[in-house]
Image (cartoon, rainbow, N blue to C red):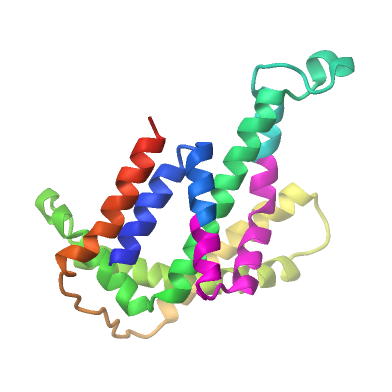
Amino acid sequence: MIKVSCFLVVALFLTQARLGGVVITLLGLLAMRAAGVGFDQRRTLAMLRRMRWLLLSILIVYLWFTPGAPLFVLLGHYSPTLQGMQSGLLRVATLMLIAVLVVLLLQSTSRSDLIGAIRWLAAPLRLLGVDNSRLALRISLILDSVEEIQPLLRRQMENLPGRGGRLSRTGDSLAGLFQAVIERAESLPRRQVTVAALRSPPPWQWLCPVALLLLFGMLAR
């Protein structure tokens, strides 16, 4: 759960898209790599490849919709801006780093331990009426289903007729995917989900997320 806590701290501050946080996170990943921590490059590249259109869309929005000095003076109002390029690249770098951190967390933590850590960290939500065990179970079921959605979508696209525009075909495929997910969920037999019962870590281990919180907090000023 210390790894999950550290991930949450870093991801929280990365969402603020500050250059200092991006640099510190990148240096931390490079240090881990130099220390011999293995990275699942295939899985990381696959995730980034799936995000490519999202990242491109974000970059385009920032380039042309952020006020500032034009990058190409001859284009006038049609030119992307320098400030937009800076903000867009920073936001894209932030999302890519979060994706890398997600892959690193998933490859270094068993699913049972990950769900157990989430249940332990979500325990205070019980004061608000949220069942943390039920929450952990739902996350476990989501993780089990995510890997099956892409093959289902591919089959839906292959089975669609060739007529119609791309937008129409996409809408039909999503509708078919939704129905396929429901049918598969209803046909699955009941199964037991094992969630690790984790104990509270030693107090000194909490120094790691606290140190990250202080470091990123100073950079955010």
Residue drawn at x 54%, y 58% is 99
What residue is rendered at 43% in x and 67% in y? 105
Q: Residue placed at 26% from the left, 72% from the top?
A: 116
Return the residue nearer the eye: 13 or 218.
218
Q: Nearer the viewer, residue 33 or 155?
A: 33
Magenta-span inclusion, residue 39: yes
User: Looking at the image, which residue is at 60% across and 39% down?
Assistant: 90
Percent of width and height locating residue 152: 61, 72
Q: Position of residue 219 (x, y in %)?
A: 41, 37
Relative side of 148 to 165, left or right: left
Q: Quadrant of the N terminus?
A: bottom left
Q: Percent x, y for residue 129? A: 13, 52
Residue 40 seen: yes
Q: Residue 89: x and y, percent? A: 65, 39
Q: What span is colored magenta in the figure?
A: 28-57
The image quarter in which residue 50 lies: bottom right
Q: In terms of depth relative to the viewer, which is nearer, 111 or 33?
A: 33
User: Which of the 4 image quarters holds residue 205?
Assistant: bottom left
Determine if residue 181 is in view: no
Count how many numbered circles sit on residues in the image.
0
Magenta highlight: main SS: helix
- Image side of residue 52 versus residue 90, left or right: right
Question: Would residue 92 be counted in the magenta stretch?
Answer: no
33 relative to 215 in the view: left or right:
right
